[in-house]
Amino acid sequence: MELGSRGSEVVFNIVTVLTGKAWDLVEDLSLDQLSSEGAMDEVLARLDRGFKYDPLTELPDDFEQYFNRLQRKTGQTLQDYVNEYTRTERRLEITQLPEKIKAWWFLRKSGVTKEQRQLVLTNVGTDGLTVEKIQKAMTFIRGQDSRPEGASRWKKSDAFFLDEEIDWADEDWDDASPIFWW
């Protein structure tokens, strides 16, 4: 627009295509204000204030993630869980919770058995309990590549269906390879 000597029209072109909330933010500007030297800066400043990212809008989802969805998943390594926990904690900037509570929450959501939790707590002790100490103890005891126990080692894809009739009496079982039937 500047090259065509029509630079003063830019503000009017922008304002005419605005709708909804964007229009509501600039509709009170008069023609004199839009024709003035700083009109573009004023319009952009109003739009920036109206559509500025507010971290408070993400806060409920961050709390949901930390208190409800944060759980060590089946097949997730300890190292991956530590990274997810740290990222979630950093997003919330959790500084008001006592360190002991954060350490307990980390351990509780880590997917270890009750006996393993007791082993970690015995190793760390209850005095000066921190997330960092829990992480170090779990890595030492379980290993950073450990995965939660209790998950079935059989996948659905490992099973198959035998739909033909077999005369079990005629089979030669001496040469048969070991097969599990269930």
Image (cartoon, rainbow, N blue to C red):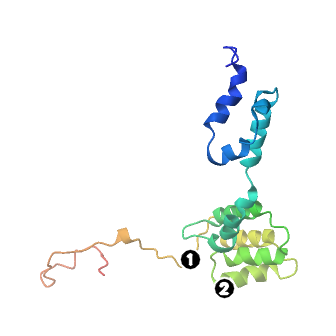
**152 or 174, which lies in front?**
152
Report whether 152 appears left or right of 52: left
Quarter holding the N terminus?
Answer: top right
Q: Residues within 10 Å of mark 1 (few under 14, many from 20)?
A: few
Residue 150 visible (yes or no)? yes
Vertical comparison of 134 with 29: above or below: below
Image quadrant where residue 29 sits: top right
**47 or 121, which lies in front?**
47
Q: Position of residue 14 (x, y in %)?
A: 66, 33
Kind of residue at disc 1? Glu
Number of the label disc, if any, that sits on residue 129: none
Q: Residue at x 83, y 82 (%)?
A: 126
Q: Position of residue 37 (x, y in %)?
A: 82, 26
Kind of residue at disc 2? Glu
Judged from the image, the secondary structure of the residue bearing numbered disc 2 is: helix
**152 or 61, which lies in front?**
61
Q: Position of residue 77 (x, y in %)?
A: 61, 65
Report whether 85 appears left or right of 97: left
Name the residue carrying label 2.
Answer: 115
Judged from the image, the secondary structure of the residue bearing numbered disc 1 is: loop
Q: Residue at x 72, y 85 (%)?
A: 118
Name the residue carrying label 1.
Answer: 149
Q: Residues within 10 Å of mark 2 (few under 14, many from 20)?
A: few
